[in-house]
Image (tube, helix red, strand yellow):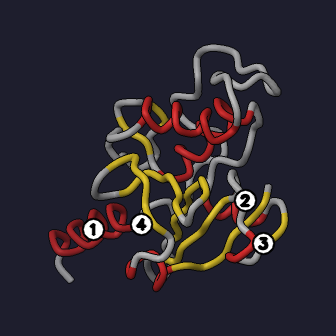
Amino acid sequence: MTSRSFILFLFISLLLGGCASQPSAPAGAPRRPVSVGEPAYKGNLKARLQTHLKAWRGTPYVYGGLSKRGIDCSGFVYVTYRDVFGQRVARSTVSLAAMGHDVPQNKLRTGDLVFFKTGRRQRHVGVYVGGGRFIHASTSKGVMVSQLNSPYWRSHYWKSVRP
């Protein structure tokens, strides 16, 4: 393999790697102090998640990102839990998958985390919002809502966790 081919391979691997791993102390962490236990949004949980989604919808996917300029899937979960639930959670997809306890897909509740195997070693995560839908940072469309039972997500579903 030539060095040019290797660089191209490395670039594509990172691009397709999604949220397979992230630093535990994110670069660009929030500048304002976060008060755990005090959600930034008011109202019931579904309304808070809807408000949060409206604020972030369309934010582009940027691997390792943690701002409105760009965010990845685990970063979006991190920000969602911080701002909507007033809780701190892990920053990497692998660490998020290891926390809490597994929940069968037919027992999902709003706020549960849903995980997908999107490649040989790549993982993706989103937040379940009810009605078979979850919010996440998509590599192709940025922050959005998707259906768990869509052909793509159904075929890549891995597990669900209640933190």
| Nearer-the-camera pick, 101 or 147 | 147
Residue depicted at x 23% and y 66%: 7
| Nearer-the-camera pick, 20 or 155 | 155
The residue indicated by pointer 3 is: 103
Q: Do the residues labelled 3 and 4 touch (CB within 8 Å)?
A: no
The residue indicated by pointer 2 is: 109
Taking 33 as reference, is 18 left or right? left
The mark lying in front, picked from 4 and 2, is 2
User: How many angstroms separate mark 4 from mark 2 (CA)?
Assistant: 28 Å
Which class describes the residues within 10 Å of circle 1: few (<14), some (14-19), or many (20+)? few
- Residue 71 x, y percent position in the rendering: 43, 42
Picture quadrant of residue 15: bottom left
- Identify the mark at residue 12; answer none if there is no mark: 1
| Nearer-the-camera pick, 141 or 24 | 141
- Residue 36 x, y percent position in the rendering: 80, 26
User: How many angstroms separate mark 1 from mark 2 (CA)?
Assistant: 35 Å
Instruction: Identify the mark nearer the N-term, 1 or 3.
Output: 1
Q: In this view, does 108 lie above or below 1?
A: above
Instruction: Identify the mark nearer the N-term, 1 or 2.
Output: 1
The residue indicated by pointer 4 is: 17
- Identify the mark at residue 33; answer none if there is no mark: none
- Residue 16 x, y percent position in the rendering: 35, 67
Instruction: Identify the mark nearer the N-term, 2 or 3.
Output: 3
Taking 125 as reference, is 101 left or right? right
The mark lying in front, picked from 2 and 3, is 2
The mark lying in front, picked from 3 and 4, is 3
Residue depicted at x 41% and y 76%: 150
- Residue 102 x, y percent position in the rendering: 79, 72
Query: Amino acid under label 4?
Result: Gly
